[in-house]
Image: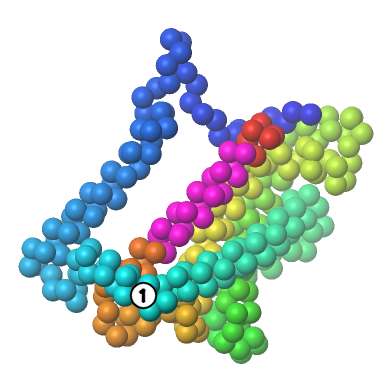
Amino acid sequence: MSVAGERPRSAAPSRDGRIPFLSRRWVRIVGGFVLPLVLLATWQIASTSGAFTASQLPSPQMVVEAAVDLAQRGLLGLYIAISTQRVLIGFLCGAALGLLFGALVGLSRLSDILFSPTLSAVRAVPSLAWVPLLILWFKIGEDSKVILIAIGAFFPVYTMVAAALKHVDRHLIEAGRAFGLNGVRLFTTVQLPAVLPSVISGLRLALAQSWLFLVAAELIASSMGLGFLLSDSSNNGRTDRLFLAIILLAVLGKLTDSLLGLFERWSARRWG
C-alpha cells in the first residue's frame, strides 16, 4: 500500500537526459570540501602571520602533532571510542523512548492530555541542570553520562513524531482501515511511513543533540573522552589539544549524521 508523503529524491534528469550540473554526485562531494579547505587556509595564514600567539591560535601543524602525540600514548583512539560508545548508547535509548512516547501522544488524545504538559516543561530544563542530579543518583560513572545523552536524544524525536502523527491525512487512515488494518498494523503500514521524513529529521536532530549532551557530561564528570580532553586542555593551556578535540567532535558528528543519511535514502527507497 503506497503512502503519500514528501521523500528525499535524486534530481530528475532534464529533458535531454542530462543531470543538472549542481546535482551531480561528484560536484556535491567536491563542493563539500571547498569551505573546509578555505577555512584551513585561513587558519594557516592567521596562525603564522604573527597576529596571534601559539597559545591563542595554534597552527594546523601543531594540532596534527598533538594528535600524533596522543595517538602514540594510546589515548586518542581510546577517547574517541569511549565518547562514540556513550553517544551511540544514549542516542539509541533516547530515540527509542522518543519514538514510543511520540507515538503515544500523537495517536492517543488521552496520552496527549496526560504527557504533553509535563514533557513540555521538562524539555525546557537546560542540559547542565541535570548533571548534579544524575551524579547524585548514579555517581560519576557511565550510567549518569548515558542517561544525560538519552535525555538529549529523547526530545527531538518525541517532538517531531508526536507533531507529525497528529497531522497524518485522515483519508490515509480511513483507507488503511478499509483494507482491514488496525492497531499496530495500521501504525506500521500507514501512519509510520506517512511521517517517516519527520522521524528521520527527529533522529538527525537527536544525534546532533547527543553530541552536545556528551560534551556537557564529560566536561564536568569524566576522566576520559573528548569532553574531558576539552576540559583538561583548557585547564592546562594546551590550545592545540583544545582545537583537536573540537575538530574531532565536528568530524564524528558529521560521520554519524552521514550514516543516518544513508538510512534515510534506504528508507525512502523502501517506503517511497
Residue 88 x/y as whole percent: 59, 64
Q: Main secondary structure of the magenta part?
A: helix
Q: Quadrant of residue 8?
A: top right
How would you rate the neighbour count of disc 1 (Cα within 10 Å): few for under 14, some for 14-19, many for 20 or more? few
Nearest the viewer among 172 and 208 is 208
Residue type, label 1: Gln
The span shown in magenta is: 249-266
Q: Is residue 152 visible?
A: no
Q: Residue at x 36, y 67 (%)?
A: 246
Q: Is residue 67 visible?
A: yes
Residue at image point 35% right, 33% down: 27
In this picture, is 5 found above or below 166?
above
**Looking at the picture, how far across and down is residue 222, in whole percent?**
49, 83
Residue 252 in the magenta stretch? The answer is yes
Q: Is residue 28 left or right of residue 129?
A: left
Identity of the residue furthest to the front in this view:
72
In the rendered image, residue 206, in percent from the top left (x then y), is placed at 57, 58
Q: Given the current orientation, which residue lies at the most extreme left position?
A: 50
Q: Residue furthest right?
A: 180
* Picture layout, residue 126 above or below residue 170: below
Q: Quadrant of the C terminus?
A: top right
| Residue annotated with mark 1 | 72
Q: Is residue 240 above or below residue 110?
A: below
Q: Quadrant of residue 118?
A: bottom right
Instruction: Between residue 75 and residue 94, name the one nearer to us.
Output: 75
Residue sitting at x 89%, y 30% = 179
Is residue 90 left or right of 73 when viewed as pictured?
right
**Which element is circle 1 on?**
helix
Residue displayed at 75% across by 53% down: 103
Answer above or below: position of 167 versus 17: below
